Amino acid sequence: MTKRHLLAGLIGAGVAGALALTLGSWPAASSGAVQAASKTVPGGSGMLPGSCGMHAEAIGYLGVLRTGQAGAARQALQSRLLAQVDDPAQHTTADLVRAVPGTSASDLAGYFSRWLPVYPQARQGQLRSCEYTLSDRPAAQPLIKAAVASFVRAGYFRSAANARSRLQMAFVSDDPAAAGSVIVTYMVAGPVFSPPVPAGATPGPHPPVHLLDSYTAIVTTANALVTGVARGGF
């Protein structure tokens, strides 16, 4: 399924107010296409991966934690913290953080030694695609397969087959903190989401709306070795 087609089953950028207005404008149940669809919205960063070109906006940040600052950083970031990934190969722990206007490296310098943007698409052309699961990119498949195996080992899924059956989106981003590594984000349909309805609005009939649950793996591109894994992410 291409991004163009999948976007018909996704809703905007995950902002609750805008989403509620979208629901209010959905057509009545007489539309078979709408009746048949099950829609999903991002549950992590609150935004979709974006353009399939190289020059998309950052989807968030990776902050390399200073020693002993994990708890303090979590308190400071609160809901902006999406996942925390230990990477023994790099001897680092990194926070994956929601992209929020006004967040700056100087604000967080006490917690992080490096504060780096993460983009939805890798620089390598063989890892970029307009297809949301990267099924048309053979070079991405060993990286995704290794990520799925690491999720199973971590107990996030019963089996690789179970993880694959739930896949909604997978994308590969450059790891800005480690040359030769990428961030694999694996997204599955999560719980049903009931967006708020603005006062005076009445939502029309619509299919269930699901949040997307994210899982993250740091994977080396040379040998598809997973060096870090976490529940959550962009």
Image (cartoon, rainbow, N blue to C red):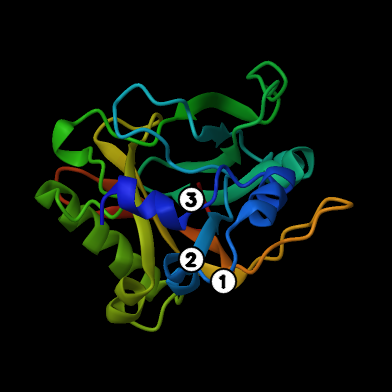
Residue under pointer 3: 86
**Sequence-wise first label, 2 or 3:** 2
Identity of the residue drawn at 20% across and 43% down: 221
Query: Looking at the picture, how far across and down is residue 67, in whole percent?
Result: 62, 37
Residue under pointer 2: 34
What amino acid does circle 3 point to? Asp
Q: CA distance from mark 1 to mark 3?
A: 47 Å
Q: Secondary structure at mark 3?
A: strand
Identity of the residue drawn at 56% across and 50% down: 84
What amino acid does circle 1 point to? Ala
Residue under pointer 1: 29
In the image, which is nearer the foreground, mark 1 or mark 3? 1
Query: Looking at the picture, how far across and down is residue 180, in whole percent?
Result: 24, 35
Q: Is residue 69 left or right of residue 87?
A: right
Disc 1 residue crowd, few under 14, some 14–19, many 20+, Cα 10 Å? some
In contact (CB < 8 Å): disc 1 and disc 2: yes
**Sequence-wise first label, 1 or 2:** 1
What amino acid does circle 2 point to? Val
Q: Is residue 180 above or below residue 228?
A: above
Q: Secondary structure at mark 1?
A: loop
Q: Is residue 157 left or right of residue 83?
A: left
